[in-house]
Image: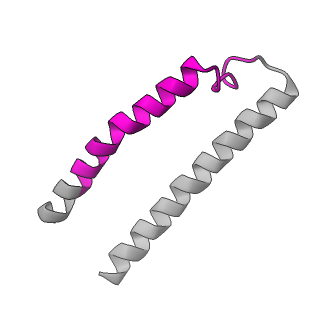
Amino acid sequence: MYRRIVPAHANCIENLPVFAVIVFAAQRRACTRVRLSGRSNAVIGVRFGFFSVQLVAFIWMIVLLMLHVVAS
């Protein structure tokens, strides 16, 4: 188990700076204004859409993890 966790952790650490730079650049270019743009129904709908995509991705990752655990 340890041999599998160490490379996975290293992969996360390697990709974290890349992700941080992308998020920082998007913020500096004003691409992430959905969070700050108010409380209108349209904005709330967009934010809920982003949240829904995030939840679906989390659920899909959990399902894949469980399938991998069952298969091994």
Please report the residue visible at 20 percent of the width from the left and 57 percent of the height from the top.
7
Does the magenta-highlighted stretch encompass residue 2?
no
Question: Up-down: is 52 above or below 20?
Answer: below
Q: Is residue 9 left or right of residue 15?
A: left
In the orientation shown, which residue stands out farthest toward the right?
41
Nearest the camera: 64 or 26?
Answer: 26
Please report the residue visible at 22 percent of the width from the left and 49 percent of the height from the top.
10
Where residue 64 appears, x then y in whole percent?
A: 45, 69
Question: Up-down: is 31 above or below 71?
Answer: above
- Tally of numbered discs: 0
What quarter of the picture does the C terminus occupy?
A: bottom left
Where residue 35 appears, x then y in whole percent?
A: 66, 23
Magenta part, dominant SS: helix
In the orientation shown, which residue stands out farthest toward the bottom?
71
Please report the residue visible at 72 percent of the width from the left and 38 percent of the height from the top.
48
Q: Is residue 26 left or right of residue 45?
A: left
Nearest the camera: 30 or 61?
Answer: 30
Does the magenta-highlighted stretch encompass residue 28?
yes
Q: Is residue 1 left or right of residue 18?
A: left
Please report the residue visible at 79 percent of the width from the left and 19 percent of the height from the top.
39
Q: How is the image coloured?
A: one colour
Where residue 4 appears, x then y in whole percent?
A: 19, 64
What quarter of the picture does the N terminus occupy?
A: bottom left
Question: Up-down: is 4 above or below 44?
Answer: below
Question: Up-down: is 42 above or below 53?
Answer: above
Bounds of the magenta span? Answer: 8-37
